Image (cartoon, rainbow, N blue to C red):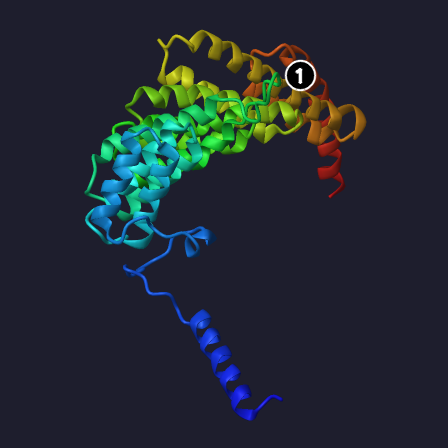
């Protein structure tokens, strides 16, 4: 027979067990911050203080256990972010990712180092390594698998270049970084973004070699945009202006002959559009006064084009047609 006392004893045991499970476990360290990943709540450092943790991580690295070492370096920065050992651990973690060719992850961890532990490492060396990683991502195929070659994805490098410029606007390679932002967009056929990046290179760094490269590439990108909209006169005008600017500013450059050819081609396309507009008013809309004005503007802007002689003939004919009409209008008034 069950007695009340036995029930009470069993209840006390159950309460004690529940309390033991629910009570927080004692830990030999104080967690001051967390970083990014959800599993930080389930993984703990191997040692109870940052000094021993760093020694342990270093021993793993010396033994060639990079994955395990990286994990312990990172846990040090997670649980003791303000410790004197944290910057060294953060740098070591980034370099391990770098050695493992995990380029994007390595870049992100170098960025964390720059933004949280400035002044504790050789700044220019880190910018240089981030620059090299960004170039690698720009020039390395993405999605390679077995015998499949993958595909180029240079736009991946653009946010990396932006971050480098954010951290080092006065860095000696800043002009090149700005130029490469344009190149990455150009290679991705993001021509409008490329044009903006190239123009920034020209404006911010006009006396560097990258200003010349940016000027040339900007004209090429504008020509692509004009080609996509062949009847867009504004796009053609901007492309021609960029080409003309290049040959004017860099008359002795290696690429000037090619740019002269492009400039003349763009001028010819502009002339053809302008002539076609005048001809429309002349032969389709039958608006002789508007046609006369368009032909006159055409001859003024393109005096040496293939269509100039024909435009001059139409000016002469339309002048005789429009002037009597104007005279009759004045007489009637």
Residue 202 in view, yes or no = no
Residue 291's place in the image compared with 85, above or below, is: above
Indicate the quadrant where residue 318 lies. top right
The residue at the point 45 percent across, 50 percent down is: 37
Between 287 and 147, the one lying in front of the other is: 147
Q: Which residue is mark 1?
A: 311
The quarter in which the N terminus is drawn is bottom right
Q: Is residue 4 above or below residue 135?
A: below
**Above or below, 78 relative to 90:** below
Near-viewer residue (118 or 264): 118
Q: Position of residue 242 (x, y in %)?
A: 47, 23
Which image quadrant for residue 70?
Answer: top left
| Residue lying farthest to the front in this orientation | 1
Q: Position of residue 297 (x, y in %)?
A: 59, 25
Q: Secondary structure at mark 1?
A: helix
Residue 291 place in picture, x, y as percent: 70, 27
Q: Residue at coordinates 41% horizontally, 18% vertically from top-left?
A: 246
* Quadrant in the rendering for residue 180: top left
Residue at the image position 43 percent from the left and 31 percent from the top: 102
């Amino acid at each position: 027979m069950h007695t009340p006392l036995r029930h009470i004893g069993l209840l006390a045991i159950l309460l004690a067990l529940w309390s033991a499970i629910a009570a927080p476990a004692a830990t030999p360290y104080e967690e001051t911050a967390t970083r990014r990943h959800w599993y930080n709540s389930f993984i703990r450092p191997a040692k109870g203080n940052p000094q021993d943790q760093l020694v342990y991580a270093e021993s793993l690295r010396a033994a060639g256990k990079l994955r395990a070492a990286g994990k312990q370096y990172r846990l040090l920065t997670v649980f003791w972010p303000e410790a004197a050992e944290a910057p060294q651990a953060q740098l070591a973690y980034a370099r391990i990712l770098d050695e493992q060719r995990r380029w994007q992850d390595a870049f992100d961890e170098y960025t964390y180092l720059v933004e949280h532990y400035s002044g504790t490492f050789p700044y220019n060396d880190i910018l240089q390594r981030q620059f090299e990683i960004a170039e690698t991502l720009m020039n390395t195929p993405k999605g390679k698998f077995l015998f499949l070659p993958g595909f180029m994805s240079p736009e991946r490098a653009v946010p990396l270049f932006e971050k480098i410029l954010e951290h080092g606007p006065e860095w000696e390679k800043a002009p090149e970084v700005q130029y490469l932002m344009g190149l990455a967009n150009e290679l991705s056929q993001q021509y409008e973004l490329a044009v903006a990046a190239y123009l920034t290179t020209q404006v911010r760094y006009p006396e560097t070699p990258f200003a010349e490269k940016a000027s040339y590439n900007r004209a090429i990108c504008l020509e692509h945009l004009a080609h996509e909209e062949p009847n867009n006169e504004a796009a053609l005008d901007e492309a021609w202006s960029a080409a003309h600017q290049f040959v004017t500013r860099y008359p002795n450059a290696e690429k000037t002959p090619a740019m002269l050819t492009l400039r003349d081609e763009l001028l010819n396309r502009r002339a053809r559009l302008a002539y076609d507009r005048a001809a429309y008013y002349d032969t389709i809309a039958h608006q002789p006064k508007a046609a006369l004005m368009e032909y006159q503007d055409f001859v003024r802007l393109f005096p040496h084009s293939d269509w100039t002689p024909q435009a001059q003939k139409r000016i002469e004919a339309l002048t005789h047609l429009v002037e009597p009409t104007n005279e009759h209008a004045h007489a009637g008034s």
